[in-house]
Amino acid sequence: MPPKEPDKPRYSADPTHNYGILTPRFWHGMGLGTWLSLLATRQCRLTPQSMLTAASITPISAINSLMGMWTNFLYGRKVHRQVLSEPPLFVLGHWRSGTTLLHELLITDPEHTFPNTYECMSPLHHLSTQRYTAPLTKWLLPSKRPMDNIEAGWDKPQEDEFALCNLGLPSPYLCWAFPHNGPVHSEYLDLRQVPKRARRRWQARLKLFVKSIAVARDKRIVLKSPPHTARVRWLLEVFPQAKFVHISRDPLKLYPSTVRLWKSLADVQGLQPDLPEYPWMEEEVLKNLVVMYQAYREDRELIPAGNLCEIRYESLVADPKAEIARMYEELNLGDYARIEPGVNQYMERTRDYKTNRFELPADVKERVRDRWGIYFDMFEYGEVGSGR
């Protein structure tokens, strides 16, 4: 008898999530030089449909560059001189570990702010254009994120890693522009193998972007990008008094959910929609966690006492009020009563939200446990399937 074909993974991306031609991709926020460099270095194989999207990015990138120069003229000196009123708070954790939930709970605090989607997509000129452009173009965005049905929009919190991409910095996230070509800039996940000069450039761009958010809203800035989990030592060089909260989750939930997330991002952000297979992706997900947590294990000892709090997704979901209150006490963020009304409103608004469910074959569970032993051990998740 012929061998039985393996079942299709339950964590495959949904192909119906492809965005339309008019839907903005994050790459629409690049300056002209950054966009042309991406085209030149990624061996882009554009399909007829993606040629239209690429054709729309090129003139927009030129406009971004011009508006960036105008914004620098208006605000450049102010951004450079800006002093943060409070050190930033970084939400750390692997993709799909609950970082979005934690981020959204933290920003219900009226004394916190965050980079929103418009600012991360238009980092060159958001200070001069957001007030006018965001209301006029909000209809272009979907109302929900395709990978998890969380609310989307220009004013919603976003990962600053996308802003760094649009500012011309190398990033592993650039693989999603031309995902058929495989991973790119893997050394920028933890920055350890990046030459010192290039790393200093990365740090300077991040600092200026954070300062630009402070110019817009001078509060404590809460930043969330999973790659920062592997960059704690470099973040501390820029923000020595930064605070960190790390969230962990059952690795057997992380793996399929992360693969699905990455495939969804490749589908909706990619410029190769007719080439939907990404054979490299599952191995990259397995490899990246190890890199992230080898770095995090080394770097968390560098964080000053009282500036790191570690929580579990399972505990946060079971009793969000207690976990947020504990975090506020450990990080000395102020009176929890200040944030409690916002937490209550968020919980009420999202009470019907359901997480995706996945079924992993036994051999995949074993592979995850074998490859991700560092994570199981660090956060005491025990045996395969125990979640304890």
Image: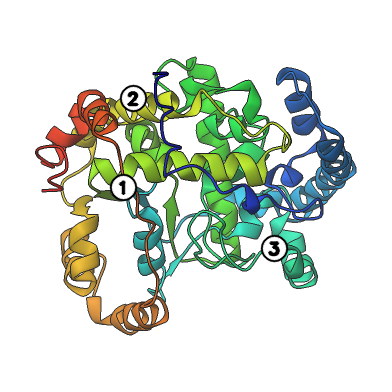
x 24%, y 82%: residue: 337
Left or right of residue 300: residue 40:
right
x 28%, y 81%: residue: 340
2 or 1: mark nearer the eye: 2
Left or right of residue 118: residue 4:
left
Sequence-earlier tag: 1 or 3: 3
Between 129 and 387, which is closer to the camera in this rendering? 387
Residue for badge 3: 141
Left or right of residue 114: residue 152:
right
Sequence-earlier tag: 3 or 2: 3
Q: Quadrant of residue 119?
A: bottom right
Rounded to the nearest angstrom, the CA distance separating label 1 from label 3 is 36 Å
Q: Position of residue 63 (x, y in %)?
A: 87, 47
Query: Can you see residue 356?
Result: yes
Residue for badge 1: 241
Left or right of residue 81: residue 379:
left
Residue for badge 2: 291
